[in-house]
Image (cartoon, rainbow, N blue to C red):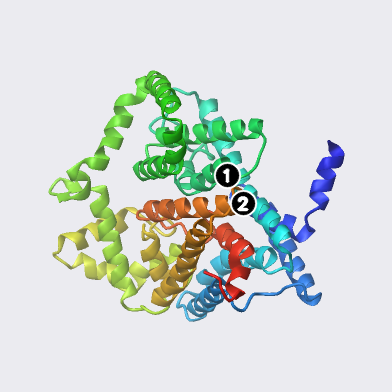
Amino acid sequence: MITNIRQYVMSYALTTWVACAYLLFSHLPGTAAMVNILVGLMLVSTVTLLVRHRIVFNAKSGLVWAFASFLVVVLASVLLSPYLEESLRPLRRDILPMVLVFVLLAAQRRNKVESDRMAQLAIWAIVAAFLLRTVLAFGDWWGQGFENDAYSIDRNIARFFDFFAIDAAIMMPVATAALLYLPMRIWARVVLGTLLVMAYVLVVISGIRAALLTVSLVTLLQLAPLLWRFKWVTLVVVSVSLAGAMTFFMPRIDKLTERYATIVTVSTYQASDQGYSSFYERRSIWKGALDMIKDRPLLGYGLGWQKFYNVAHEKGYYDKWKQSDKQIDKAVVKYFDYVNYGSANPHNVWVQILFETGVLGLLAYASMLAILCYRAIRALRHKYQAGVAQCFAYGTLAYLVSYFMINMMNGLWLGAGATLTLLAVSEMLLGTDESQPNAG
């Protein structure tokens, strides 16, 4: 067994292991030191490969050009930002590793078989990170007692539980695709399936409505063909699971039901004399952000959402809203009255990208996602056999649906989710096809 492990490890280049290790640790909290070490190793690896002429980009790949355009726009937004120092930090923290991972995974000379193996390893890296986070978050919950939920758990102690549900909303589709399509032994599939069930339970008790709605809908869509194929077994399993869930969640069912019922409550989306609903508050934040964006529409204010609070106050927007009689402006003022630097943010990924990098940044980033979606659909149309290509295709489409849904209220883009991994995997699997005359 030790010999087999050694042969498996040696079958991949060291540069690939370094890049995949970064994908693993960058998704785990409390690993900043390890992440910085891996970024340094990736930088050394990239320089070494460049010197040895082992880096070759496909000049006919649409994704390569979109990626390059995105980098140019991001650099311009940073260099021309009125908040240069603040914008340089996310450039080093998020953009530099993003470039290094893409280069090490997608731009090395490899044949088709090697590319498929590297793609599968990259997918497993982020799946492993999500599964490890699931175990740690479940351990937090277990440590404080299963009778606790989002309303009673001590988040100061349960640092792995906090924010787990939001991350799960965009990571579970990839892990579910791995369960369904990647080759593995039966025991491994059982373990993976069990961990995904644990992750779903954690999402339920989190009390985060957008996360539960996203995970439930997307997972159901992913499992629908399998559930329909084994519909009688599915009926029994669902019935037993519902009975068990009702028994387990009965002590906290009132609070959770009341919380999730607000998803379909009209008052959730309207303002009233008694106060502002959560959705109306989001609308007011978006309106305030767009007021700021109008003055720097092309390149925004530079990378980093943390400056959102400072821009509102230092550029006079807060005073302008305070003098307004409009209800939505009053809601913006109320929001900025109880937040501060580092907590105020646009609460929508597209508004946030506009704020940070402007219209040009939004177009560049959207073009990468569009190419990613196109490649996933093309992989399905070409009827790839079960394996890494099918995992990429179905996983990417499910991931994009989750990404759009959860980011209606959040700003997860650089350094979050599986976007970077899927971009690199798509280039490894399908990028060379675009150089062929009959591609697409």
Counting the numbered discs, the total is 2
Q: Is residue 337 visible?
A: yes
**Residue lying furthest right in this view?**
3
Mark 1 lies on residue: 181
Q: Is residue 33 visible?
A: no
Q: Residue 151: which quarter of the image?
A: top left
Q: Check disc 2 and give the amino acid type.
A: Val
Please tell me which of labels 2 and 1 falls first in the chain: 1
Q: Is residue 98 above or below residue 178?
A: below
Q: Residue at x 45, y 46 (%)?
A: 169
Q: Position of residue 119 (x, y in %)?
A: 65, 56
Mark 2 lies on residue: 388
The answer to whether residue 23 is left or right of residue 44 is: left
Q: Position of residue 80 (x, y in %)?
A: 48, 81
For the N terminus, which image quadrant? top right
Q: Check disc 1 and give the amino acid type.
A: Tyr
Q: CA distance from mark 2 to mark 1?
A: 7 Å
